[in-house]
Amino acid sequence: MSQTALPVRTDAPVTSDELAFEAVPACAAAQAEDAQLQQKLNTTRDGALVAPGQIWEDLDSRQKKRRVVVVSVQSGRARVRTHYGVRLSTLSVSRMHKHSTGFRLVAPGEVRYGASAAPSDEKAQS
């Protein structure tokens, strides 16, 4: 019976250079392809790129103008929170379109926070 030599295991510590080398993707083309895929997945039917900080309004008539704020987006899924709350939900980017069961992007001028401010040329009365 012949015995084959087993590889000798050394418990030498791994250097930070070796870890950094393994963490870097194989090529820049793969990174560019992944970024392109993410952009495609995170774009709505209407061509709007979903991004953190955007406010979307639910168009379902049962929801009474529910608004959500996008917290993060990845792989066609948007993590959102209620406009004035902390409850988190996940929405499919494919649902973010102008339809009775979808969402629409709220323009920044439509958002009202608290009491209206006095115009800049007028002084607020105390």
Image: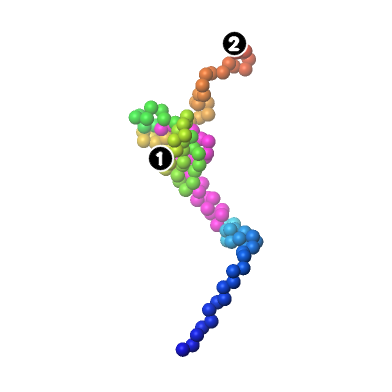
Q: Please tell me which residue is depicted at 61% across the width and 60% down the height of the picture.
A: 19
**Disc 1: which residue:** 95
Looking at the rendered structure, the secondary structure element under dot 1 is helix
Q: Quadrant of the C terminus?
A: top right
Residue 45 can be seen, yes or no:
no
| Residue 52 sits inside the magenta stretch | yes
Q: Nearer the viewer, residue 90 or 30?
A: 90
Q: Amino acid at mark 2?
A: Ser
| Residue 46 sits inside the magenta stretch | yes
Distance from the alpha carbon under mark 1 to that under mark 2: 46 Å
User: Would you call the spot at circle 2 few (<14 residues within 10 Å), some (14-19), or many (20 or more)?
Assistant: few
> Where is residue 37 shown, x and y percent of the image?
50, 51
Q: Please tell me which residue is depicted at 51% across the width and 46% down the height of the picture.
A: 39
Start-end of magenta stretch: 30-58
| Number of callouts | 2
67 over 8 or under it: above or below: above
The mark found on residue 6 in the picture is: none
Q: Please tell me which residue is depicted at 52% across the width and 39% down the height of the picture.
A: 52
> Where is residue 119 shown, x and y percent of the image?
59, 16
Q: Nearer the viewer, residue 84 or 16?
A: 16
Residue 126 can be seen, yes or no:
yes
Name the colour scheme: rainbow
Quarter of the figure with residue 20: bottom right
> Quick one: label 1 or label 2, which is nearer the N terminus?
1
Q: Amino acid at mark 1?
A: Arg
Q: Residue furthest front?
A: 11
> Where is residue 71 shown, x and y percent of the image?
50, 39
121 over 10 or under it: above or below: above
**Disc 2: which residue:** 126
